[in-house]
Image (cartoon, rainbow, N blue to C red):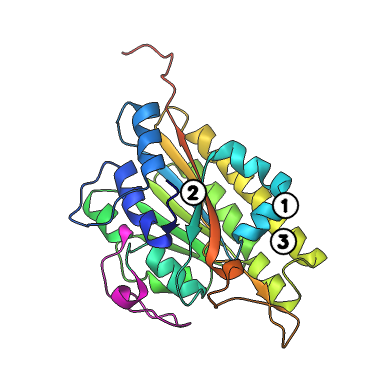
Amino acid sequence: MFIMYSLDVVTPTILDLFGIKTESKNLAIVEIKEERIRLLEDKPVERMLLYSPDAMGEWLYQKYREEFLPVEDIAPVTLEVESMTPSVTPVCFASMFTGMKPKDHGIQRYEKPVLQVETVFDTLVKAGKRVAIVAVKDCSIDLIFRNREIDYYSEPYDKEVEDRVIELLKEDKYDLILAYNQSYDDTMHSSTPESPESIEAFREHIRTFSKLAAEFNNVNKERNRVLAFLPDHGTHIDPDTGKGTHGTELREDMEVRHFWGIYKGEKSNMPDL
């Protein structure tokens, strides 16, 4: 039977992967849970890198499948996921990282207040995990998860986000890093979702994910770990302006593709001292 998950399943899935028990009624993604049990013998992961590119919808994946092959190679468990209504960035990421519907977490339109409800980051901190969010300054992810005992890195734009994440991975001190990029969303709003500039922007997101994944796997090769590629919503062309937009209940806005990769740590060949 086909199950269409929604964005709010990301939080319980993250917690299940880390082996953190909660009282939430939300269940982790079955396919991810089964993959963890199979690959890791039901053991938890130790490190996680989440990459969230803005506005890369399911239709983009279906139309440009070959472009996404590097993502599938890194994170081969793929799932079609339903976005939130309205399909705008702060609403979507609030649901993704609280495990709640918009009416429950409180962001129900395009605004960027600090969330007053429990987020996945709060739960991770309580469990002793070290968390960093790396995002473009003043974007939704940069603002709505503030006032928590986690580290925030606000960067000028996407390339600086990439550079910062590489730096943090080399420092090897965070259990979870969330990285956000936005150039595809910016470009499609100023042109169309398939303009040459927009196509190059989403290709750059894929290249960035590949670079970050390579560094993450190199640093954490002896640890059980997870990489995920988690966009928030899709896009369509506004018939009035002729430019890219989103926020509706159209399938083009509401359907996204998530990618998860679970890796088992390689045992060190170094003898115990």
Residue 214 in view of the camera: no
Mark 2 belongs to which amino acid? Leu
The CA distance from mark 2 to mark 1 is 31 Å
Q: Position of residue 144 (x, y in %)?
A: 40, 73
Circle 2/circle 1 CB separation < 8 Å: no
Q: Position of residue 87 (x, y in %)?
A: 51, 73
The CA distance from mark 1 to mark 3 is 13 Å
Would you name the residue on which mark 2 appears? Answer: 168
Please tell me whether residue 180 is drawn above or below residue 165 in the rendered image.
below
Q: Nearer the viewer, residue 109 or 61?
A: 61
Magenta-tinted stretch: 101-120
Circle 2/circle 3 CB separation < 8 Å: no
The answer to whether residue 107 is magenta is: yes
Would you name the residue on which mark 3 appears? Answer: 201
Secondary-structure class at tag 3: helix
Relative placement, left or right, of 90 versus 8 is right
